[in-house]
Each structure stands twice: as C-alpha cells, then as structure tokens.
Image: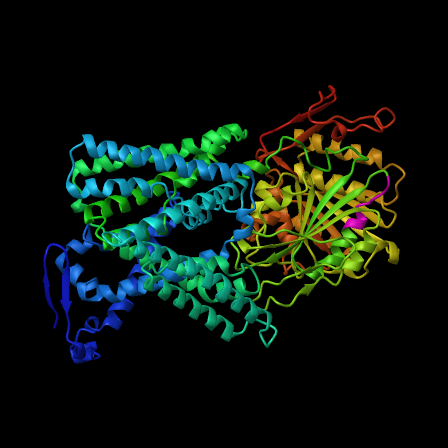
Amino acid sequence: MAAVSGNANKTLVCQNPHSYGHKDIWHLGNPFDSPTCLLFMQASLITVVTQFLDICLRQLGQSSLVSQILVGVMFGPSFLGNKKILGQTLFPVKGSVVLETTASFGLMFFYFVWCVKMDLATLLKTEKLAITIGISVFTLTLVIPTGLSFVLKKYVPMDTSLSNALPFLAISQTLTVFISIAVLLTDLKFLNTDIGRLTMSAAMFADIAGFSLTMIMFAILQNKGGSIVTLVGIILSMVVLLLIIVFVMRPTIIWMVEHPGGGSVNELCIVCIFLFVLLSGLMSELIGQHFAMGPILLGLSVPEGPPIGTALMSKLETISLAFLYPIYLAVNGMQTDFFKIDFQSLWVVCFILIVAFFVKIGAVMLPGYYYNLPMKECCVVGLLLNGRGIAEISMYNLWMGTKLLSEQEYALMVASIVVINAIIAPLIKFIYDPSEQYETGRRCTIQHNRRESELRVMVCIQNNENIPTLLNLLEASYASEESTIAVTALVLVELHGRARPMLVANHPTKALFVQPHATQATSTMPLGNTPFIMKATSPFSLSLQSQPLTLSTMMSAECLSKVGPTFSSCPSTRGGRLMPPLRFLIVLERAPCSVGILVDRGILSTSPSLFMARATFSVAVFFIGGADDAESLAYASRMARHECVCVTIVRFLLFGDENTKDRKRDSDLIDEYRCYNVGNRRFEILEEVVKDGIEMSTCIRRLIDYFDLVMVGREHPDSVMFQGHDQWSECQELGIIGDMLASPDFLTKASVLVVQQQRIRGRVIKSNINAIPLSNHKDQLLHDVPIHETLSPSCTISVDKYDKV
C-alpha cells in the first residue's frame, strides 16, 4: 500500500517494494497496481486520445502541438484529473515517476532526431536578410519586453512570486528555438518553401544567441550565492562537453560509417550512436545542465541524410515523434493547473506576451523593408517566429523545478503556448498560400507558344525502366535547329534523414549517380541509361540534375518551377498503375506550366533511339473537347513534324450535338491544325460519332491496339459520354478517360500520356478560334500571340462555364 503525505510544496509517495507482484483480474487483483501495467495503460490512452484529437483539430487548421498539450490538460487537475476517481485510477501520484521518466527519455531522443534532420551547414550559409532578421528579432524582443517587465514590477501591484518571475518570462519571449519552428513549419508544410527556409535560417541565428543566453542564465541561477570560480567552472564544463561531442563522438561515428564491415550501417554502429546519446545526456546532467543539451549538440554534429541519417530515422523517427513526443507534451499538460491562475496575474502576463508578439513581427518588418521583402511575407515570417513548441515547455518545466516559476506562472506560460499556436497556425494558412510563389501570369503551354519557339521540358524520373520511353517521347517531340528542345531531367529519390530536400547538379558528360533511400545508402544507384540520354538528346539543350526528396515533397510544384515555364512529364510504373502512394495531384494543382503524366507500358522502350532504329511509331490523340485536349492536340501536331511519327487525331462527336458553341470552337481548332498539316501524310484526323459512353468505350477498345502511344486530356466538359465511367474512376490525377486507359483491366500495350494544360490562377486558358486562312497567317497563330499583346478581332481568349480548377 502507498502512504501519501504532503504539504503545500511537495508530495511524498512511499511504496512497499515487495508489492509489485503480478496481479491479474483472474485472481481478483488490480492489474494497475503494477507500475508496468499502469504505464502501458497511460501510454495507450494518451496515444489514442492524442491521435483522435489531432484528427479533429487539424480540420480547424491547428498544429499537432495544440492537441497534444490539450490531451495532458484534459487528464490533468484542470479537467478529468480533478475528479478523485478518474485521477487516482488513470494517473495516480504513485505512477507519475515512471511516466515522467519515460517522457523525459522520449524528449531526449526527440531532440536528437530533429537535430539529425537539420542541415546546419546550409542553414548557416544563408543570405544577409536572414542574419539581419535573426539579430533584429533577438535584440528587440530582449530589450522591449524585458524593459517593460521591470516597469510593470515597479508600478503595477502583483504577488511576490509573479514579480520575481516576470523578468524571466519576458526574457523567455526572446527565444526563437529552431526546433520548435521546424516542427511548426513541418505541420504547416512550409519547411521547403522560400518563406520556410528564410524563417529557419533566421531562427537559427536567433537561437544561437538565445541558447547561449539561456545556458549562461541557467548557470548563474545554479550558482546563486556561490563563488565566481564555480560559475566559470560550470561554463567551462559546457565548453568541454561541446569539444567531446565534436572531436570525439562525431569522428567516431563517421569512422564507423566509413568502415561498416558489411557495406552498410550495421547494428553495432546504431547501438553505439544510441549509447552516445545516453552518455551525452548523462554528461549534461553531471555538469548541471538540462539532459537535452548533450543530445541536441550530438544531433547537430551527426551528418544528416544517408547513410547514417537514413538509418537513424528508420530506427527512431516513428517511436520518437509519434509515440514518446506526445507523451512528454501530455505529461507537461497534466502538470498544468489553470485553477491556480488569478485575474491580476493573467492580465499582467498577457500584456507582456502581446507586446512581445507584435515586437517580434515588427523586428522582422524593419529589415524586411530595407531588403524590399513584401510586407505580407514579413508578417508571415514574424508569425512563424512567434511559434512556440516543446523547447519552451522544457524550459518552463526546468524553471518550475528550480522554483523560478510557481505553478501559477507555469500554467500561464503553457496556456500562452497553446493560445499562440492555436492563433498563428490558421492565421498563416488564411493569409498566405505557399503555392503562390509558383503562380505566373505568363502562358506556359505548347498551344500558346510560338510555332518555332524553344520547347522547355522537365522530365521527372523515378524509375530507371522509364528512361528509354521518355527518351523516345522526347525524340518524337521533334527537336530541330529552328525549334530546339531544352530538357531538364530531374531524378526523384525518396530520402529519409533530412528535413529539407537536396538538389544535386550532375555534369551532362558524366554518369549520373544518386543515393538510394534505403538504409544501405553507402552504395550508389547508377542510372545506366545515361549514355542513351546523351546520345539520344544530341540536338537538345540538356540540364541533368538529381534531387533526393522526402516522399511528402517529392512531387511538389517547387520542382517544376526550377526551370521556369515547362511542359512536364512524370512517369509511372509499368502495368498501368501509378506507384502508390506517389500522387501527382499537388503538381496538377500548382504547376506553373502544362503537365503530362506518362503511364509506361514499355512499348516505346523497345529501341533506345528513334533515330537509330528508324522505326515508325503511331501516336493517337483521343479528342473530346476542352483545354486539356487542345494541349494534347498541339503537342501531337509538333510530333507530326517528325519523319518517324504518325499522328492520328480521333475526335469523338456526340450524336445530336451539332450546333453547340463548344463543338464549333473545337472544330475551328482542329481546322487550324488541319491547315498547318496539309500535305503531311503522317497527320490524319478521324471522327467517330457516338451516342453514349458505352459506344465511346467500345470505339476506344477497337482503335487503341493500332497505336503505340495514346494522348488524352485530363479534364473535359460535362457530357453524357462520361456517364457511368466517372463511377469507376480510381485515379483522380488521370481523369476519367486516362484512368480507363491506364487500368490493368484495359488490355492494351499502348502507353498513355495524360495531359493537363496550364492553369493560370486556377483557371483554364481557352481559345475561341475562327478559321484562319493558311495563306495569310502561316507564321502567326493564336498561340503565337504573347499574352501582353492585343489580340486581333478574329482571335480571342475567354473563360467559359466549363472551366474547372
């Protein structure tokens, strides 16, 4: 049995060490008397409730930190913990030590994992704007809130506890911890945006100053009433710990990685790193610092990315970030008692926090104005730098343990973290969309480009088997001296162990090697088709790059904007199915250019080059109507200029729909391309009249085996031809017809290219075209007119009711 005695400051729990025997329900015992069963129950309950609350609050735009702290508050004395039955059963005092120890263990590895994912060298090699913002934020938030706290202490009546803690609460607003900012940016999916990179770099410089200030202040508090020699010894011990980590542990880890004995990062190396984490935490405690200090320094010193970063993430990321991290936040939430807060203290602290909040935003705007950073982006960076997280909670917990904060001040600061994060997360999403940086008012389509202009293509390669098909597709695109093709090959490699993507430029005359995403990342994955790339693309202007990415950012629109306006082609795996969970919806929604998704069935890979084989390839365009089909038609018209490519336009007409404006517009468009291909026997137009979707599907099945490549638009105007097919569509990114053609049930060997024309601010570019006589307009079509020029009366650009986002 446990005898509990306490006073106003502490609770002492005494337990019989021989009472921990196994007690199950079959022997009429209480299993939760066992610390093991109690810990399992508490951890399970926290995890389940956290995940449920996180799902609910994410619909409101909240970050995960808010839900995780609220779970602890829910089980704490402010809510359910105040009930005697629930409090003593679910989270009794006797079980707090084991739970808090587990949470502290998770905190240590959480810091280590996030620091391993940080690319410290890249963050420190940054522009002057980030350095200026970091210095400005640290200086102004140190001077103004701290000075205000002393003014309030002098002129505003408050209790002694708050008066003593107020300067420290003001100083804590100076901190801009990069780990907390990184977690917030990850939740908002801003980490790989320009704003995210600027915020992280500024936070890094501000955190260097803030971290140093915190460590010195903590050393002074520890040495309160002691001698100067002791204070110098505490500071020197921190320097010695840093030197041990940098010059002993880091070289040891690198040596073990370079000499694994089996060609990969073996288990012994991982175990040694885990041991270093524990030892660094132990040494931090021995010198009087927080146990997280050592793991943070060790994580920053460990090389991020493969091979070691990848191996560590595969071992630690899930258990640390998804399990132990929420437990630590919940435990701190359970220590929060909102009933301890009085109104007088509340408004004083709120005043300090509000002033610090706006001072930090102003500290970003001042250098932003000098460097011509838009005020909207300055405001977003300021809001992001106001983000709070686990580092601030750890600091407040530490201060409460040293009696620097009472339970009232601790509850106020935890509440401030929840409120600030609950405000800034949805506010940032409301005022700023990171995809705006990729938007353009310029038309980047094949249809609207000049006939002899350069075609710029980005080819996204995720599988080596698709390279021959992509090369033949590029060759079929007809590169000539008058109309060149500039190709950027982007090799996408899923990469663990890094918080940010990495772009590696490869010289076009050298073989391309990229590191795989597996833990055995010391080996390389050669793209053996590189000689074919160089030989097949001899008429092209080629830029070859490799970009290892995390899966969540692998298909981000950022990749597409790196070469400006492009027509982008992204391959899938063979067999007619896209590789799950790789999805192209983000690209389709945000791409600043036209996009093509290639479903490769291997037909075009039978020869490494059209020029070498002199084979004839048959290409079909299934034209139903709409802007996407118009883009497919424009691309096929360019292909028809290649001597080895035969193009057939199969136009599907709905019976009884002869006099609609849409059909007349589509007829004018097809007549234009018919005129420009007069005399070209490799360009043919067929018309198929159908009554419904069944007849269209039957016709497609009858024709498709005659072609090697079929192009189709992703979206079409509403029509009865799609009735029934939309119910069976599984891949939204392919559209109704593209999904039908790519389905494994559709027995064909033809590859499929699904095309989406560029959307400008979410709208489709469409053309109303009157027939243009060939003799008068041979060198100037509608798509030859730049967007800033006034169109002639016979050519107009309009948006009609069928436009879709």
Q: Is residue 566 left or right of residue 643?
A: left
Q: Position of residue 550 (x, y in %)?
A: 55, 55
Say if 465 sits above or below 208 in the image: below
The residue at the point 46 percent across, 72 percent down is 271
Between residue 104 and residue 694, name the one nearer to us.
Answer: 104
Q: Is residue 100 visible?
A: yes
Say if 249 sits above or below 571 in the image: below
Position of the C terminus, as image quadrant, is top right
Position of the N terminus, as image quadrant, is bottom left
Image quadrant assignment for residue 323: bottom left
Q: Is residue 321 visible?
A: no
The residue at the point 17 percent across, 44 percent down is 161
What is the count of numbered marks?
Answer: 0
Is 475 inside the magenta-drawn segment?
yes
Q: Which residues are magenta?
A: 474-481
Q: Is residue 33 left or right of residue 553?
A: left
Image quadrant assignment for residue 285: bottom left
Between residue 601 and residue 609, name the one nearer to us.
Answer: 609
Q: Position of residue 90 (x, y in %)?
A: 21, 63
Between residue 682 and residue 102, name the one nearer to us.
Answer: 102
Q: Is residue 242 left or right of residue 712?
A: left
Say if 369 sits above or below 480 in the image: above
State the predominant SS element of the stretch in magenta.
Answer: loop
Between residue 597 and residue 15, name the one nearer to us.
Answer: 15
